[in-house]
Image: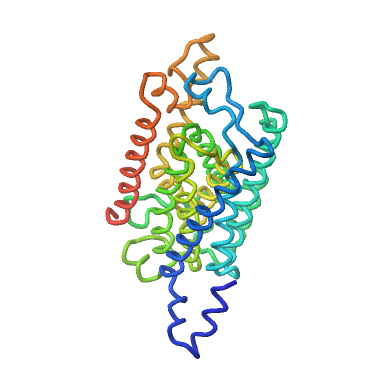
Amino acid sequence: MLYELLYSLSDEISVFNVFRYITFRTMLAILTAFFFTFIVAPTCIRWLKKISFTQHIRDDGPKTHLKKEGTPTMGGIIIIASVLVSVLLWGNLRNPYMLILILSFLGFGLIGFIDDYLKVTKKSYKGLPGRYKLLAQFLIALSVTLFLYFNPKDPYTTVLSIPFFKQWLIDLGLFYIPFAIFVIVGASNAVNLTDGMDGLAVGLVGIAAIVNAVLLYISGHAVFAKYLYVLYIPGTGELAIFCGAILGACLGFLWYNSYPAEIFMGDVGSLSLGGALGTLAVITKHEIILAIVGGIFVVEALSVILQVGYFKLTNGRRIFKMAPLHHHFELKKWPEPKVIVRFWIIGIILALLSLLTLKLR
């Protein structure tokens, strides 16, 4: 771990004292993850094409997507690798929150990898059966939740924080366990459902990562947390480095995933990133803020739930032209880049609203 090595030299060489600052290491994490992804991606794209790990496009989807058949997928492996390299270099791995976040990130990534692998080897859009996928997600989320529930260093173990209000806390008690599981699993699947257009999901995750980095830094800083009436949870500030790594990886990947995409991140990327966002929200008690900054993810997931439910209740009638919601606008003749950019704009507005909650308390 380069951070500990360099910081240990600060007694002899004062310039290395800069590595004590989370903000400095977060910037390094962003740059490291970005350049790692940017440099590695072209080789990975060629390799995935060579072994025929390419995307199979559903016949019942938008016809404009048929031209994407054969685009390399499973690019989320690059994102996972770049985040891990960056965190290993600049993060404090003695921090228990960092370790549990890494395990959650890798666990959801493994589920996505198996799902993607089955799809590409079968040349089908059907991968890991839904019940097995949900069971695996549930077990990982349960492990994270139980760790947090029995964490003696967290003074707000079962608390739900309500934004916009000073210290309005709701103690969920044992209900915290199913609630936290729902948040983590829900976030993972919501990002996965949003990943249906070039650069859409990865761009929105990058926006959410910025907000999370700010919230984590404040939550882990006693003075700032007290001033802004945010729950002070010692040790969580270190996770800003993980958020920086996610941001850098998303920016680097977006270079190749922007329209027209040269590579897709697949479930291995979307499930791991969504699981990380959900885990971060549960650790810092910012579950409601996650629903705000990730409003597009929430709406995309709800559009699928409503569409399926209405379809079954009305024997085939639909609310939207197609779900998830981004396909609805695509079938309304919006060009794909326009849908993507407009969703990003909404994501940025939601991010600003999320940060606004820090002052409206």
Q: Is residue 244 above or below residue 195?
A: below
Tell me, yes or no, if residue 85 can be seen here. yes
Residue 168 vs residue 187, the one in the foreground: 187
147 lies left or right of 31:
right
Q: What is the x, y in percent for residue 185? A: 57, 41
Write the residue at 40% across / 70% down.
222
Tell me, yes or no, if residue 232 can be seen here. no
Residue 155 vs residue 23, the one in the foreground: 23
Write the residue at 67% across / 26% down.
124
79 lies left or right of 326:
right
**Figure quadrant of the N terminus:** bottom right
Give the color scheme: rainbow, by chain, secondary structure or one colour. rainbow
Q: What is the x, y in percent for residue 306? A: 48, 23
Residue 31 vs residue 183, the one in the foreground: 31
Q: What is the x, y in percent for residue 298? A: 45, 36
Q: What is the x, y in percent for residue 361? A: 29, 55
Write the residue at 55% across / 47% down.
42
Q: Residue furthest left?
A: 360
Q: Is residue 215 above or below residue 137?
A: below
The image quadrant that residue 21 belongs to is: bottom left
Q: Is residue 95 above or below residue 74?
A: below
